[in-house]
Image (cartoon, rainbow, N blue to C red):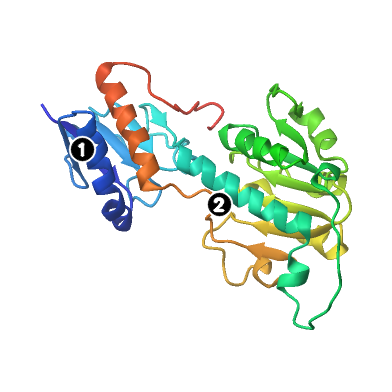
Amino acid sequence: MSINILFAAGAKDWEVYKPHLEREFQNRALDFHLGTDIKPSEVDYIIYASTSTLRDFTPFTRCKAVLNLWAGVDTIVGNQSLKIPLARMVDHGLTRGMVEWVAGHVLRYHLGMDRHIINPEQRWEPHIPPLAEERIITLLGLGELGRNCAEALQHLGFQIRGWSRRAKHIENMETYSGENGLLAALKGADMVVLLLPSTPETENILDKTALSALKKEAYVINPGRGPLIEDEALLAALDSGQIAHATLDVFRNEPLPKEHAFWSHPNVTVTPHIAAATRASCAAPVIAENVQRGEAGTPFLHLVDRTSGY
């Protein structure tokens, strides 16, 4: 009997993912039916993204797992109708994309690139930045993405501090944890990169107190989740000079409303949630692997802990 796999995401996503998913299922010799309109009581797996209109999972009585296309699961993890396993996306392309995006924006600030890229007055002002080994960068979040970004920045020579909610030991890295370790991790840092999930515990973690712990004229880089930053506190810190500039890829409301102050602030760079895009060619093997595991009765990869929210 065919494995019925429902693709529940946007129409454009279906066009992109369909050939990649079909190829991966075929490569694993799975007898499958992949579609966007399958009777709920006959669905075995749901490939899901928040662009889908699906909100009620109650009719899917036969479904073995929901396989999220994206790393973030904050839009679905609290759904009370979802009683079956939920797996988030962890794949090579997503991780490498995030590492490259973070490294690029860190180097932009470290090297002071803007003074030459944005130079309408044609000023000839040589500027020699400090070496990377003289910069302290704090990463909030030491999951898959956070660890990879931290290690890449270490390879470039930066002093790296890592903070996580629960204690983690990473070789050759200064790590902190819990409420008591947060300000210690931020104290005197030149930059902070936020790579935490969005949970009640992490909301507004970068508030006025946290921002004031950073070195004066520090930089904020947020490719994690919008609610991690207290927006008004960040704007006040930018206006006072405590924060020199912020690059923000994620927001509480997306797309970011045209009237939001971030758009017009001279010391804010807005990017449209592109830091860690899921690529179909990289995600499809992960989805297929989990379907194969489900059929074999072996544990799913990257299962979400509902109590922690990620």
Please report the residue visible at 88 percent of the width from the left and 49 percent of the height from the top.
215
**Where, by quadrant of the figure, is residue 76 drawn?**
top left
Name the residue tied to disc 1: 40
Tell me if mark 2 has few (under 14), some (14-19) or many (20+) residues whose alpha carbon lies within 10 angstroms of its own: many
Callout 1: helix, strand or loop? helix
**Where, by quadrant of the figure, is residue 64 drawn?**
top left
Q: Amino acid at mark 2?
A: Ala
Tell me if mark 1 has few (under 14), some (14-19) or many (20+) residues whose alpha carbon lies within 10 angstroms of its own: some
Task: Report x, y in % for residue 203.
Answer: 66, 43
Task: Report x, y in % for residue 45.
Answer: 27, 33
The nearer-to-camera label among 1 and 2 is 2
Left or right of 53? Residue 214 is right
Please report the residue visible at 27 percent of the width from the left and 41 percent of the height from the top.
21
Q: Which mark is residue 283?
A: none
Please report the residue visible at 52 percent of the width from the left and 55 percent of the height from the top.
274
Q: Amino acid at mark 1?
A: Pro
In this view of the protein, can residue 234 be seen by the observer? no
Name the residue tied to disc 2: 275
